[in-house]
Amino acid sequence: MTTGRLIAQRYRLEERLGAGGMGVVWRATDLELRRTVALKRSHTGDAGQIRREARIGAGLTDAHVVTVYDVVMDGDERWLVMEYLPSRSLDELLAAGGPLPPEQVRRIGADLAGALAAMHAADITHRDIKPANTLVGEDGTAKLSDLGIARWSEATVTGGAQAAGTAGYLAPEVANGHEATPAADVFSLGATLYAAATGRSPWGSGEAGPYAQLRRAAAYDLEPLTGELAPVLGALMAKRADRRPTARQAIDLLTGVAPAPPHKRQWRLAVSIGAAVVVVLLAAGLLTTFFRQAPQKSADLLGDPRTADPCALLVPNSLARFGKVALEPNYGNFNHCDLVVDTTGKGDIVDVALELRLPDEYPAEPSTPGKLGQVQADPPTENRCKRTIPLPNLYRVVIFARQVNNKPAELCGAAEAVALAAYGKLAQGPIPRRTSFEADSTASVDACRLLTGAAVKTAIGRAAPAEPDYGNWTCYWQNATRQVTIEFGREWPLEDDPPDGARISVGGRLAFMDTSEDGECDVTVVHRRYTPIVASEKGTPRERDETVTITLEDKNITDGTGLCPDVTAMAQVAVSRLPR
């Protein structure tokens, strides 16, 4: 994109003003009205994001919100036409001159609070108040910009920082996956003013990355509040949303019309409570136990791998901006849980799955034992995008988004939103435990014990040690050319929707045998039909099948048909060892 380009046969691009998380902004000349305007186009060409911002901006007429004039099409690109304000962002002011004096912080804060009051009166939540979205004019007037992720209140359902703002300025409840509300905007206003007064976010400088800030936000680990602005900032950034002033009340606090409540040094209260706990524990003779157990709880977020609940790390609202979201807790292996998103309301599905996994033998990025790692991004493919969170014991939380109907979708945006929401959950402490499984479930079975050494030796030609995967719900045996895999799963009733392959019987149980051109044969046996304790989304089958799949692969052949007798024999052995 170059200077001089004509947009919609009317707006001539003059100067690239900058780029943010949502788009790039240009100064342009309106050749028809002969005025200077600002033009914005989404980074990704997301016309929906530009359209949303235009509709929200058109409904606001406040002196401290950048005015939206129009939205125009230029070929396949949609551009937002806005008021041009000769200004610098608060980010740029701080980078150039450092922290601002208290009176200037108050003036900027009052202007922003007025903008928020107008937005909240119109039932709109901004959701991304920060220095980069605060424009300060030559006369000192401040205006809010970038309504790209704002929402009317009836549609405001969020979770995960990618969908609900910027990590350094998030309210603690949003960092923990809850809905962004007007009270969260007020917190972000306070965080922005804290940065104006100190030069850094209340969740730290950000040098360790946004996920470190997200973790601090989720734990409400604020930087110290000092100086004459501490009472006002303390009120705006109160931990509990219902303790914060409204945006209208914030104007009075910042202009001095209303006195700010005394700033409470919460750390002193915490020390006092902690001292009292120590006294009680000393009296009870439990101090050694208390200090021995506390570090273990903070260091081990996984606990028993077989009881850790992967669904507990999913926040359905984190994907609300992508479409209608449903939790699917009864599909795949027992380390697996899904969020299913209908992106159009017409069955165009994106599946975002979360799995708990073993440590990576060859990690792309090193992790630090004993410390929750940063969210790691794999290069996206055409139909999949993946995020990984290393746990303190080096086990992993893996999130991957995929297209189900091959329709265009923001797969990496969805994976990132779910990963950030999961990270916020992990920052609160250990993964919650799942509801116990029924006695005849394969969840209580060790997959490695279902096959005998003799059966495996017959299939791969020699004895081989069992290699268990996460939770012992999958197991492998291999030599240089062949591999046997046994894996548990949960499916919709297979009898109603049979998979590919031949229908057979193994040990009196329904089974399906299939081959591939990759030198593979597999047999899937239905272990039992059951009704889940935790129901799935309405409209899906109420019952589920627990399955056991035995696979034999040979990398030196293409037709797997000749492998099927050995696979069937192994399936017979495995079925004989399943619980009745």
Image (spheres, rainbow, N blue to C red):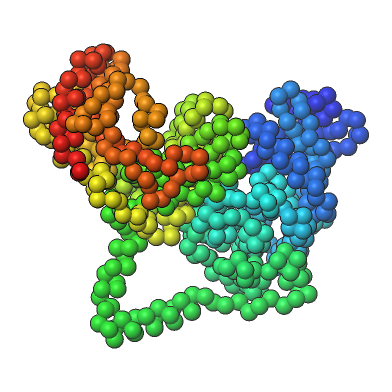
Can I make out residue 306 in this image?
Answer: yes
Is residue 93 left or right of 559 when viewed as pictured? right
| Vertical side of 91 occupied by 220: above or below | below
Q: Residue furthest front?
A: 508
Report the side of 6 relative to 333 (left or right): right
Instruction: Name the residue: 13% across, 29% down.
Output: 456
Q: Is residue 410 depicted above or below 531 in this figure?
A: above
Place residue 469 in its image quadrant. top left
**Rendering quarter of residue 80:** top right
x%, y% of residue 503?
29, 23
Q: Position of residue 119 (x, y in %)?
A: 75, 55
Quadrant showing the N terminus = top right
Looking at the image, the residue that sits furthest to the right is: 33
Q: Quadrant of the C terminus?
A: top left
Is 212 in front, or is 240? 240
Does 473 appear above or below 519? below
